[in-house]
Image (cartoon, rainbow, N blue to C red):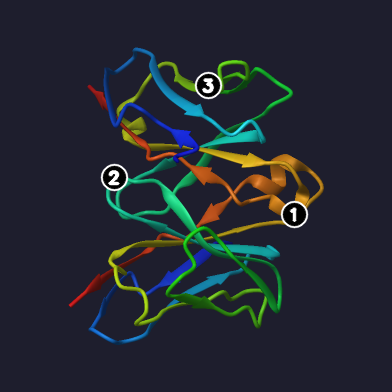
Amino acid sequence: DGGITQSPKYLFRKEGQNVTLSCEQNLNHDAMYWYRQDPGQGLRLIYYSQIVNDFQKGDIAEGYSVSREKKESFPLTVTSAQKNPTAFYLCASSPRDRARATNEKLFFGSGTQLSVL
Amino acid sequence: DQQVKQNSPSLSVQEGRISILNCDYTNSMFDYFLWYKKYPAEGPTFLISISSIKDKNEDGRFTVFLNKSAKHLSLHIVPSQPGDSAVYFCAASAGLYTNAGKSTFGDGTTLTVKP
């Protein structure tokens, strides 16, 4: 089955620690995204990548880093500089296509809940 | 300044009746709108979308209406079913090909459909 796999489902971070959230997709999508969701709020864009070896900051990139060495993978590192990391993190992908309806539709993973110890 | 607003945090309807979820936006550059459905501890799934060149798009029980002059869209679910109980997110996107997928999301509306 094609889809997006996020791991782990739950993650705990200690003070001053960096943690990495995994995101893998086998949909052959060019674009990948990381969103953060806080309770009762919508999704906010952290980073996105439209092609391998290239990525751009979203609206709330401070304290996060990403890499895109392979088309299938887009890991997110939550660094110690992120002072409020507790949230639900969602990875998504979309194809790059001239059809707007195809391009805009995001496919999401099942998320990682990050909590601070 | 929140550019996409869903002013009703929750909505409760009876099974078989119509559910109407509302969304307002402020950025006049938004020209493509999507609705996603989300169950607890899962990622959102795409439901329906509409381009600004249309004012209505229908897919089965789901219809989205767009009023550009009022910067307002709504999602109608008819008839509502208990399995529709979820959080519904409105999302908006602006312009160019390079911006595709960078949607701005509302805070969501929790729909409860009672049997």
User: Which residue is label 3 attached to?
Assistant: B72
Give the residue displayed 73% in from the left and 41% down from the top.
B95
The answer to whether mark 1 and mark 2 are in CB contact below 8 A is no
In this view, B11 is above or below B38: above
Disc 3, SS: strand
- Kindly identify which chain the residue marked by label 2 belongs to: A
| Distance of label 2 from label 3 (alpha carbons) | 21 Å
Disc 1, SS: helix
The answer to whether mark 2 and mark 3 are in CB contact below 8 A is no
For this rendering, which residue is in front, B80 or A98? A98
Residue A33 is drawn in which quadrant? Answer: bottom right
- Label 2 sits on what residue type? Gly
Disc 2, SS: loop
- Label 3 sits on what residue type? His
Residue A99 percent location from the top left of the image: 78, 43
Q: Is residue A63 left or right of residue B28?
A: left
In this view, B65 is above or below A53: above
- Kindly identify which chain the residue marked by label 1 belongs to: B
User: Which residue is label 1 attached to?
Assistant: B98
Q: Is residue B79 left or right of residue A93?
A: left
- Which circle marks residue A40 in the picture? 2
Q: Is residue A16 left or right of residue A50?
A: left
Q: Could you confirm whether marks 1 and 2 are on the same chain?
A: no
Q: Is residue A100 left or right of residue B90?
A: right
Residue B43 percent location from the top left of the image: 42, 53
| Distance of label 3 from label 1 (alpha carbons) | 25 Å
- Label 1 sits on what residue type? Thr
Give the residue displayed 82% in from the left and 47% down from the top.
A98
Question: Which part of the image, by quadrant, shows the C terminus of chain A?
Answer: bottom left
